Image (tube, grey):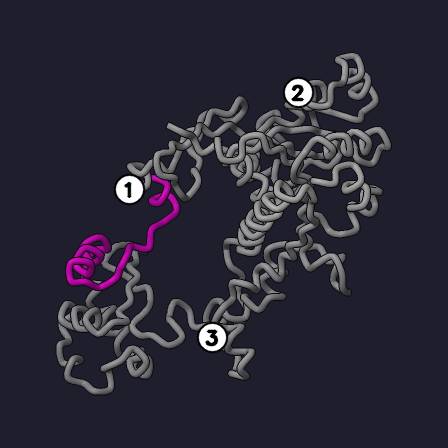
């Protein structure tokens, strides 16, 4: 049986990325079988190598224990290379000449300050696909703004419609701009790679993270383009549909979410919560009309849900044909037996953090099996493999690079 890693076997990706957006794009390539070489500087390791430690223990090598890094740099190799040095840049361009894709998600000034331009990259390898992921584009007055989850969400208007009417703007717990940009970059890179294989000419691809996030903000953007007033934050409720919310149940801080948009769903819900009179009320005969009576409906539904243990409420709603689910804690999700049965989690053994479960790709291919995930690399773990095995350097030359501080296997934290 074939493995997922057959899909991009033979493709080499150079990743000069940090945090989440760019590393996710690189990880997608690695998960599908590409050889992904992650470059970090001796004095500039990826910031997410630190923090979110297993058991909150940084250990003696905290740069090799960061939980975020573990997740988003699996199936990669680590080359620690000083790109501020002339020799380091020359090695980088030599590697570019032997690769298929180059991904970077730095502010535009970073490559400029390093003296690396797309013209340099294209001259070294006319077939390469370069993917640039600036926060706010490579041109315009905001080009040098540093992007992070909160300022992307705020700039794109998401914070203004999140939360409740009396709270003011609220950030999302998950910085959605990062994964959305990462997935968009993956798609764009794969399309450009296919074209490069067909034509022999590479491409420069820009994926501005703010534009990527705006691309999925559908209803609010549409309303703004037709002149409607800005939507206001409304908690768990839907802008047009009622009932649609999360309700407390009998348990301690246990909740159930449900919606009843279709008439058969609303009829089933009315019977279940003991309010069949709703079915004869013309003011409740559509989800849009019901929005005007939302407070009344919520109170009646809450009276029923708070009398039920959470799982009993979910089971009763589902039996009746009402879409519902428990509002699970993250610990419950990790231990969810359905995900376990479907093979969503895979144990990965890391030399520093030990055995931990990681989420696999959220899709499957017919008559293909998932390949084993390899752990995130130690800092500089593959220096020699890349320099000697790919670039053909001698062991003595690599020794000299290490002595000169051009490469390293532990961060220079001075």
Whether residue 58 appears in this view of the structure is no
Q: What residue is pinned by disc 3?
A: 165
Q: Quadrant of residue 26?
A: top right
How crowded is the residue under tag 2: few (<14 C-alpha within 10 Å), some, or many (20+)? some
- Residue position for label 2: 385
Numbered range of the magenta stretch: 308-335
Q: Quadrant of residue 276?
A: bottom left
Q: Say above or below: 182 vs 14.
A: below
Q: CA distance from mark 2 to mark 3?
A: 56 Å
The reply to whether the magenta stretch includes residue 103 is: no
Seen from the viewer's position, the closer of residues 89 and 82 is 89
Of marks 1 and 2, the one in the foreground: 2
Pointer 1 residue:
338
Whole-percent x, y for residue 358 in the image: 44, 35
User: How would you rate the neighbour count of disc 1 (Cα within 10 Å): few for under 14, some for 14-19, many for 20 or more?
Assistant: few
Q: Is residue 266 above or below residue 42?
A: below
Percent across and percent down for residue 109 are: 79, 51
**Which residue is located at x 66 percent, y 47 percent?**
131
């Amino acid at each position: 049986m074939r493995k997922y890693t057959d899909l991009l076997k033979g493709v080499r990706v150079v990743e000069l990325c940090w945090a989440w957006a760019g590393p996710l794009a690189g990880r997608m390539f690695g998960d599908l079988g590409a050889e992904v070489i992650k470059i970090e500087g001796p004095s500039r390791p990826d910031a997410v190598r630190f923090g979110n430690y297993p058991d909150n223990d940084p250990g003696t090598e905290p740069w090799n224990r960061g939980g975020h890094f573990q997740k988003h740099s699996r199936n990669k190799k680590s080359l620690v290379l000083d790109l501020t040095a002339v020799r380091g840049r020359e090695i980088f361009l030599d590697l570019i000449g032997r690769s298929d894709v180059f991904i970077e998600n730095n502010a535009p000034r970073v490559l400029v300050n390093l003296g690396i331009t797309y013209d340099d990259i294209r001259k070294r390898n006319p077939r390469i696909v370069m993917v640039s992921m600036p926060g706010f584009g490579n041109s315009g007055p905001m080009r040098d703004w540093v992007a992070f989850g909160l300022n992307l969400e705020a700039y794109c208007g998401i914070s203004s419609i999140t939360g409740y009417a009396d709270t003011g703007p609220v950030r999302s717990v998950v910085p959605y701009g990062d994964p959305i940009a990462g997935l968009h970059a993956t798609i764009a890179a794969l399309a450009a790679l296919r074209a490069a294989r067909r034509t022999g000419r590479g491409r420069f691809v820009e994926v501005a993270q703010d534009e990527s996030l705006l691309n999925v903000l559908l209803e609010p953007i549409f309303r703004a383009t037709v002149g409607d007033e800005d939507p206001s934050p409304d908690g768990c409720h839907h802008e047009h549909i009622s009932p649609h919310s999360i309700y407390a149940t009998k348990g301690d801080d246990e909740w159930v979410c449900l919606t009843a948009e279709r008439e058969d769903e609303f009829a089933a819900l009315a019977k279940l919560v003991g309010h069949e009179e709703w079915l004869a009320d013309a003011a409740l005969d559509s989800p849009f009309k019901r929005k005007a009576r939302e407070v009344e409906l919520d109170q009646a539904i809450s009276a029923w849900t708070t009398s039920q243990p959470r799982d009993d409420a979910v089971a009763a709603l589902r039996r009746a044909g009402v879409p519902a689910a428990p509002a699970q804690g993250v610990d419950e999700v990790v231990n969810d037996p359905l995900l376990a049965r479907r093979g969503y989690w895979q144990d990965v053994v890391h030399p520093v953090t030990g055995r931990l479960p990681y989420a696999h790709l959220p899709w499957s291919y017919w008559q293909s099996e998932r390949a084993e995930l390899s752990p995130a690399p130690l800092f500089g773990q593959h220096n020699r493999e890349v320099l000697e095995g790919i670039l053909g350097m001698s062991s003595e030359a690599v020794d000299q690079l290490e002595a000169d501080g051009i490469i390293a296997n532990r961060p220079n934290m001075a």
